[in-house]
Amino acid sequence: MNIKKISRIFMLAICLSLSYLAEGHANPLPEQKLPEVKASAACLMDTATGLIYYEKEGDKRREPASLTKVMTAILAIENGNLKDVVTVSKKAAVISMGQDIGLQTGDRLYLEDLLKAALMHSANDSTVAIAEHIGGSHDMFVKMMNDKARALGMLHTHFANTNGFHHPDHYTTAKDLAILASYALKNKTFAELVKTQEATITWLPNRDELKTGGAADRLPVRRLVLHNTNRLLQSDFKGIDGVKTGTTPRAGNCLIASATREGRQLVAVILHSSNRWSDAIKLLTYGFTEVKPVVLAEKDEVMAELPVIGGTDKKVTLVAAQKVEAYLVASDTEKVVRRITLAPAPAAPVKQGSKLGTATYYLNGREIAAVDLVANRRVDRLSWFKRWFS
């Protein structure tokens, strides 16, 4: 059998087994004491990885109150223009339950100002105006909300309105809200709005006040100063940067709070709590101080071997290109699974540092880290004479 035929068979064998699984080898951490919260349901999530560090009744259906407006806002940001001029309809103007900004039929405001009213002041009338502008109608916008929820994997959520008013078909869970907030916070416009402590919004001239049809028609005729309802933004808790409060008699006091430290952002969801502020601080403190980085692989750690075709060595050792860490709770360290994916057997020469594979780490089916696998040394090509006789 000649060398070309041997090589083809060899390559086929390698290609048929390009990856394999191995149990993670992260060192177990000492058990951590979980925080005690008063909330009926709560969740603490890493916004980058989606890892959950704390969960209390995370999948139990609850009313979200004004936390609903997170979905309303992110959809408007993604589908509208902040400088769109929105004309308020009669339906939006009659909304007067709970918080509002006193919208009247025919009022004209920038979409950006309506978003500030919804996210900072929790204005219910502003969400209806937003919905009609973006979706064409309130009902069509609600459909967009439910479509987005499904796309994000919010499996236990259904929206019936844009502001969180009680409705038997309006519900979500702490875990689903953490998924939503983690997604929304990746949008720079949303992230900026929810960390703003004070803002002034303006009304533009309505039809009766329009004069020139030019720039003068965008001069403000009324102003309103808004203050963010999220008290944590005024607290001394390090890194607080959002996101939203919510309160109704049925939902109780609710809060989504986010904080960032050293590039790591956590989001805490608190539902139906007698002290939402304290609960959120407890969860965020736990996440930043008790959830530790776990080394999944050291730099240059040997991970696999790969055959080399026509090389001075028959195999090359693959090592981790860099150190790999993940923030994990103690109970999860032994659940990490590593998947090694290898390239087809390379033909010599192989350069030191050549990428020939990937190690990917999973927890409960979710990818939490990955690292390139590279050749730890050079493998030269056999001379023609040696290749012939080998």
Image: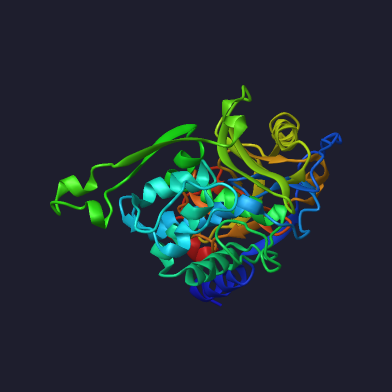
Q: Residue furthest front?
A: 208
The percent coordinates of residue 319 (x first, y second) are: 60, 44
Q: Name which residue lies at 59% across and 36% down.
A: 230
The percent coordinates of residue 189 (x first, y second) are: 42, 45
Q: Is residue 270 above or below residue 309?
A: above
The one nearer the camera, 207 or 253, is 207
User: Which quadrant of the figure contains the C terminus?
Assistant: bottom right
Let me know if residue 300 appears in the view: no
Let me know if residue 274 appears in the view: yes
The one nearer the camera, 256 or 384, is 256
The percent coordinates of residue 170 (x first, y second) are: 66, 64
Q: Is residue 6 above or below residue 390?
A: below
Q: Is residue 271 above or below residue 37?
A: below
Q: Residue furthest top?
A: 236
Quadrant position of residue 88: bottom left
The percent coordinates of residue 89 (x first, y second) are: 40, 62
User: Which quadrant of the figure contains the N terminus?
Assistant: bottom right
Applied colour scheme: rainbow
Q: Name which residue lies at 45% across and 44% down.
A: 116
In the rendered structure, the answer to whether residue 282 lies left or right of residue 244 reads right
The number of numbered discs placed on residues in the rendered structure image is 0
